[in-house]
Image: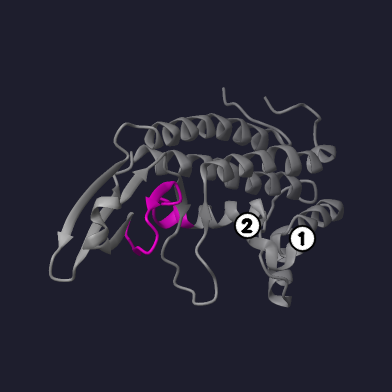
Amino acid sequence: MGISAQGADHFRMKIARAYKHVQEFNDLVVAQCTRPDPYTVTAQDDVVNGRYIIRCAFNPMDQDIPLSLGDVIYNLRSGLDQLAWQLALMGTVTPGRETAFPIAWEDTPKTQEWIRKLTWQMPCDAIAIIQDLQPYKRGNAYRQDRLWQLNELSNIDKHRLPAGRCTDSNIYVAPLGFIKSDFDNGVEFSWPLTEKSSVVFEPRTPTLIFGDPIYNSTNRMPLEVTREDVVAIYNDIRERIEPRFTRFFSTAPIV
């Protein structure tokens, strides 16, 4: 005998599943950042150029971390599309294949046409809520919208792992007057050789940043989110978005 979920149950099940992955993701990131050897630090004298160089590289990340993040993102994003399907079922017995939960960062006639194509079979009140939730409602601040961040992460995860890299904001460096150079997954500092004896370099607990470090568009910056942002995305779906659709379905709480 098969098992079926009615109304918003699919969406709620997806959110509940995402929570388990949020917990796993959070634990993995904390373990990575607090391990005894998150960095490899090397130092050398560049006699030719008269520089003392310290190079700090973030050690390879546990590959379960981006995979776990992908699980969080998939459950939340697909849950929204399943919500859209259930809303469309209120207007027809056979929703169109294009039915989905639109997420748009700009408000243009083309965007509005696309939203209508994805939502036209839903109740008008539900469409109005979806319109009100769109990231473009925040104007130039759309990048801070959790739905936009979720959608960007989802698009990345469809084609490649959401890259994780370390920030260098938790490194104490002295004296001032150094030259800093960033490289893939690390950073390099250099001082005049005459300053070598006074150099202090103390890497502290790192912060992992996730997103896409390489963006092909020339007019948009790459997405960057932290562990805390991922938790905030989950909370936004659960506490801000899901309740707005409760009146269309059963009021049973998410477990």
The answer to whether residue 163 is left or right of residue 119 is left
Label 1 neighbour load within 10 Å: few <14, some 14-19, many 20+: some
What type is the residue that disc 2 sits on?
Trp
According to the image, label 1 marks what residue?
Answer: 120
- State how the image is colored: one colour
Q: Closer to the camera: disc 1 or disc 2?
A: 2
248 vs 216, nearest the viewer: 216
* Label at residue 135: none
Q: Position of residue 133 (x, y in %)?
A: 75, 55
Looking at the rendered image, the quarter that the N terminus falls into is: top right
Q: Which residue sits furthest left? A: 48
Disc 1, SS: loop
Which residue, as the protein is rendered here, is positioned at the far top?
1
Quadrant where the image shows the C terminus: top right
Which stretch appears magenta? 156-184
Where is mark 2, residue-wise?
Answer: 148
Q: State yes or no: residue 179 in magenta.
A: yes
